[in-house]
Amino acid sequence: MQRLALFDLDRTLIDLDAAFVRWAEEFVSQQHLNPEALTWLVGQDRDTHPHREAFFSRVREHFGLAEPVQELWAGYRRRMPHLVQCYPGVLAGLADLRAAGWRVGIVTNGTADNQLGKLRRTGLADAVDGYAVSGVEGIRKPEAGLFEIAAQRCGTSLDGSGWMVGDNPVADIQGGQAAGLRTIWIDRGTWSGHEHRAHHVVADVAEAFDVLHDAR
């Protein structure tokens, strides 16, 4: 079987945090909010990474907005694919893995419109062999089924020799290991004190690429 490397999307391959700040700046301007609103929005996102429906419920209540939660959330989903960018070296790193004989895929939780938009706008959809989005498939990480779908889309299977790279120790690391994959955790300092059993811990995806190239 060919070697398989699966990657998470948000905060693994793309810089969602920087994109969120850009979105928040636009939102504050469009809603005519005071400058302190930006600090509040970024803090809410950074501290808990809440599900977006819950996030926009808080936003609507905090600022006394008239728009329904679903409308606010839909506007965010439409805009974010235009704001996200890959971390430096991501597209080249994926290309190098494929050139070295790896099958490369993406496994991401999230709504279909938002995540597919990100994949297409960043060029990642064409940079990998396949991908699986929870909002399309109706199953979410850490359930093994989403990893299995991604592997199949890459033309291979979860045969015990694959890898999963991600920043979430539950969805990506526990989920990947339950699916029979070796794991690389990108520790961004947002899961302080959380226990994990990742095979490798790195600071960013560039280091993860190095681990994979050194893997036997």
Image: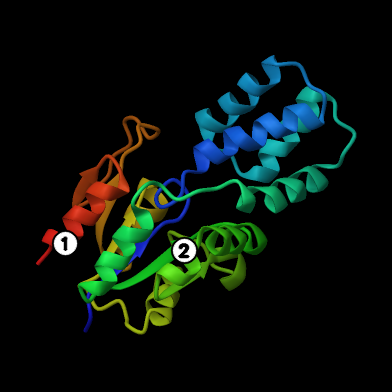
The reply to whether callout 1 and callout 2 are in contact (CB within 8 Å) is no
Examine the rendering and report whether any part of residue 180 can be seen: no
Examine the rendering and report whether any part of residue 83 can be seen: yes
Measured as percent of width and height from the top left, residue 185 is found at 29, 48
Toward the right, the furthest residue is 66
The tag on residue 139 is none
* Foreground pick, 66 / 101: 101
Amino acid of disc 2: Leu
Q: In which quarter of the view is residue 121 placed?
A: bottom right
* Foreground pick, 18 / 46: 18
> What scheme was used to colour the molecule?
rainbow
Measured as percent of width and height from the top left, residue 169 is found at 35, 47
User: Does 6 sit left or right of 212 as displayed?
Assistant: right
> Which residue is painted at 39% across and 69% down in the image?
105
Seen in the picture, residue 18 relative to 37 is either above or below; the reply is below
> Which residue is painted at 25% across and 70% down in the image?
162
The residue that disc 2 covers is 124
Mark 1 or 2, nearer chain start: 2
Seen in the picture, residue 154 relative to 23 is either above or below; the reply is below
Secondary structure beneath disc 2? helix
Q: In the rendered image, which quarter contains the N terminus?
A: bottom left
Seen in the picture, residue 109 relative to 12 is either above or below; the reply is below
User: Does 79 sit left or right of 201 as displayed?
Assistant: right
Few, some or many C-alpha atoms within 10 Å of disc 1 (few <14, some 14-19, many ≥20)?
A: few
Amino acid of disc 1: His
Q: In the rendered image, which quarter contains the C terminus?
A: bottom left
Measured as percent of width and height from the top left, residue 24 is found at 66, 32
User: Does 211 sit left or right of 81 as displayed?
Assistant: left
The residue that disc 1 covers is 213
> Which residue is painted at 47% across and 44% down in the image?
15
Q: In which quarter of the view is residue 147 placed?
A: bottom left
